[in-house]
Image (tube, helix red, strand yellow):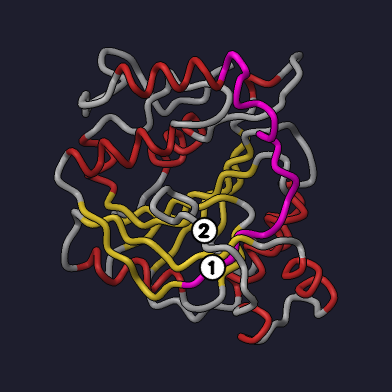
Amino acid sequence: MSKVSMLITSFMRPHLLKWNLFSLARQDIRSELEIIVLNDGIPDETEAVCREYQDRLNLKYVFTGQRNQGQEIIYRVPAFALNIGARMASGDILIISCAEMFHINKTVDLLTAPLQYNPRLLATSIGMDDDGTFLEYVIRHHGNFDLEAYHRRYPRLNTKIPFLMAIHRNELFAIGGYDEDFVGFAYDDNDFVDRMLGNGCSYCLTQAKTIHLYHVRHDSGLERSPEYLYNQRLYHSRKGQIVRNIGREWGKIKP
C-alpha cells in the first residue's frame, strides 16, 4: 500500500476540525496515513485540538497564517496552505480536505484504492452539505451517529472540487501546484481541477461518504468584492495554461 498524506486546511474552524479528526480516528485505515493540519488563519485553538488527537493519529500541526499578521482577515483561498502541505507531505497519494468534513465511512481507504492502480485519477467522494441539523445531532450524541441521520435530505455537495479528493503527488507537482496568484476567495479550486483534468487526469467517484459540517458562509455577499472579481478575471485569462508558479519558489511559508 502507498503512503498517504491528508492535507487539512483550517481557517478559523477549530470547533469543526475536532469532528473531522474525531471521525478520522474511528476509521480502521489500511494505508500508512499522515495528517498535516494547515492553520491558515490566526493563532487559535486549532493547535490544541490537534494535540488532543496526536496519540491516536499520525498528525502534524503547521501554522501557515504568517501573512495574516496586522491585517483584517475575512477569507483566504487555501492555495498557499495546500502547496505548503504538499511540499511537506511524505505520501505518494495526497488527500485534499478542509477542516469541516465529517467522515461517514472508511473514506481514506475508499478514496485511495483507485489511485493504487491508476495515479492519474481524481478520486472523489459522495458528499452532503449540512444545514446545521447534522452538526447539532453529532454534538448532542458526542460524535456518534446512525445512517438515518446522515441520509436526511441534505443538498448534495459539489465534490468535483477538492472538499475531499485524493490525487497523486506527482500529478500536483506536474502542474506546479495551486496557482499562488489567487487571493481572497473563489476560483482557485476550480482552476486547480481544470488544470489537473487538462493534464490528463480524470474523475473517479468512489463510495467514500462525507458531510460538510454547517458553518456561516464567510463568502456570503462578497461576490462583487475586488478579490472575487480579480480571481474571476485571473481564472478566465489563464484558461488552458496548465503549469503555474513558473520561475518562482512555491509552497513555502512566507511572512
Q: Is residue 201 left or right of residue 192?
A: left
Question: Residue beneath label 1, please?
Answer: 210
Residue 55 placement (x, y as % from top left) = 65, 67
Question: Residue beneath label 2, please?
Answer: 157
Position above or below: 215 against 250: below
> At numbered mark 2, what does the secondary structure look like: helix, strand or loop?
loop
Q: Which residue is drawn at 72% across and 18% down?
A: 69
Between residue 152 and residue 242, name the one nearer to us: 152
- Please report whichever mark, 2 or 1, sits nearer to the chain's N-terminal start: 2
Q: Is residue 52 left or right of residue 4?
A: right
- The magenta region covers 209-227
Q: Residue at x 38, y 32 (%)?
A: 178
Residue 2 placement (x, y as % from top left) = 28, 65
> At numbered mark 1, what does the secondary structure look like: helix, strand or loop?
strand
Binning the other alpha carbons within 10 Å of mark 1 as few (below 14), some (14 to 19) or many (20 upward) gives many
Binning the other alpha carbons within 10 Å of mark 2 as few (below 14), some (14 to 19) or many (20 upward) gives some
Q: Which residue is drawn at 64% across and 55% down?
A: 100
Position above or below: 127 against 74: below
- Kind of residue at disc 1: Thr
Position above or below: 97 against 12: below
- Kind of residue at disc 2: Leu
Q: Do the residues labelled 2 and 1 touch (CB within 8 Å)?
A: yes
Task: Answer whether residue 218 is magenta in the image.
Answer: yes
Total number of numbered discs in the rendering = 2
